[in-house]
Image: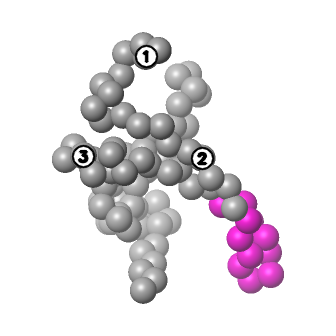
Amino acid sequence: MTTGVDLARTGVGTIIGRKSVSKGKEYARIWVYVPTKVSEDTAFPFKTGQPCLVKIDESKTQLTVKPISEKDAIELGWRKRARRK
C-alpha cells in the first residue's frame, strides 16, 4: 500500500472512546492513541500534559493537532490540570 507518507514518522493509531461521569452527568471522552514509534521520534512536537489545538478540516476530512502555548490555551478556555501520580 503506497500512501505517499513518510513511513519513518508514521504509525497506525487508534481512536478510543470511553464514558466518563462527572458531577452526576455522563460524557463521552475520545482519545487518539499515538504509536510509541511516532511519539518517541525526535520530530514529535508534543510533551505529555502540554496543551494542543485540535481542529477538524472538513475539506480534507482530517483532524489537525498543533502544539500551542499555555497562555494561548488558557485564552481559549483550557485549564491546566494537576497530574495524577
Q: Is residue 58 magenta?
A: no
Q: Give the mark nearest the N terminus, 1 or 2.
A: 1
63 to the left or right of 11 = right
Q: Position of residue 9 (x, y in %)?
A: 30, 35
Q: Position of residue 8 (x, y in %)?
A: 27, 32
Q: Which mark is residue 12?
A: none
Amino acid type at circle 2 is Ile
Residue range (magenta): 19-29
Q: Dot 1 corresponds to which residue?
A: 3
Q: Dot 3 corresponds to which residue?
A: 41
Q: Secondary structure at mark 1?
A: loop
Q: Main secondary structure of the magenta part?
A: strand
Distance Cα–Cα, label 3 vs label 2 = 20 Å
83 to the left or right of 71 = right
At 67% across and 55% down in the image, what residue appears?
Answer: 17
Q: Position of residue 36 (x, y in %)?
A: 37, 51
Amino acid type at circle 3 is Asp
Taking 46 as reference, is 23 above or below it?
A: below
Q: Dot 2 corresponds to which residue?
A: 15
Residue sitting at the far left: 42
